[in-house]
Image (tube, rainbow, N blue to C red):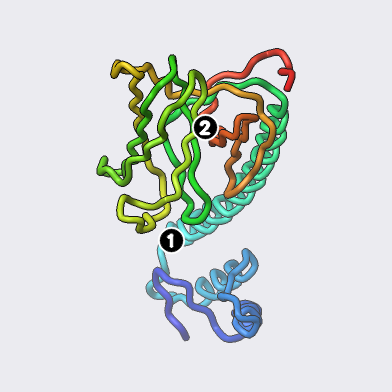
Amino acid sequence: MTTAVGSLTSSPSASTSATQTAATATAAGAAPTMNEQDFLQLLMAQMQNQDPLQPDDSTAWVTQLATYSQVEQSVAQTSTLNTISTQLQGLSSTNTANLIGKSVTLQGNTLAWNGTSPATSAVTLAAPAQHVAVTVSDSGGNTVKVLQLGPQSTGSVSIQWDGTNQTGQAEPAGTYTFAVSATGANGTSVGVSQSVSGIVTQVSYANGSSTLTLNNGTTASISQLASVNAAQATQ
């Protein structure tokens, strides 16, 4: 007689199905799995082989059944949430595509450096500037590089950083911030707005996020979208 207290123990005949299932999964290179039928077979074997003089507490059976039920519900919920997430992502992509041809305003002071393609953004100058400098900083606030853009006219100014520091070495991929200072011909400060407006000409998708491209060459994440004009813009 086999005694099992507080654990699932079965006789060879009672657990044949579970053993075959595990062997099949192992042969296929996958981790052994147990379905509901396997669990119930092992539970019955445990009950049949318990010591009659010291029977297991019936509460243990209820607890084991409840635990298995909770695991099954968790797996089902995860599958359902993954399906909902996929559907929402598809809906979001469709809605973002509707921005093509619309006049939008983007905000933000981040540069997303992916390690290969130059990171781009833009700002808006309130007046013509003789000198425009862009200071790129890492997540710790340390200055990585200062870009000198030279004279710029009023309006949108594109910013492009190739991912290198002052010594020409490539920086690790990641999100960086930038600050822009501009001065006029007489040395006075020129107002700089961390926003840029334009017409969306392209929407691209990568790693679950959307990137907008404007007719002035500006590219930015959808998270930087500040406003959208209700009327269709004329390009």
135 relative position to 97: left or right = left
CA neighbours of label 2 inside 10 A, class few (<14), some (14 to 19), many (20+): few
Residue at 45 percent of width and 60 percent of height: 58
Residue at 47 percent of width and 55 percent of height: 115
Task: Name the spot of residue 18 as percent of width and height, x first.
Answer: 61, 77
| Residue at image mark 1 | 60
Which image quadrant for residue 199?
Answer: top right
Q: Residue furthest front?
A: 185
229 relative position to 117: left or right = right
Task: Name the spot of residue 231 as percent of width and height, x first.
Answer: 71, 13
Name the kind of residue labelled 1 in the image. Answer: Ala
Which image quadrant for residue 180?
Answer: top left
Q: Secondary structure at mark 1?
A: helix
Residue at 45 percent of width and 56 percent of height: 63
Task: Name the spot of residue 186 as percent of width and height, x first.
Answer: 31, 16
Question: Tag 2 or tag 1, which sits nearer the N-term?
Answer: 1
Any part of residue 159 in sight: yes
Task: Name the spot of residue 191 as percent of width and height, x first.
Answer: 37, 16
Q: Is residue 44 above or below residue 208?
A: below
Q: Secondary structure at mark 2?
A: helix
| Residue at image mark 2 | 223
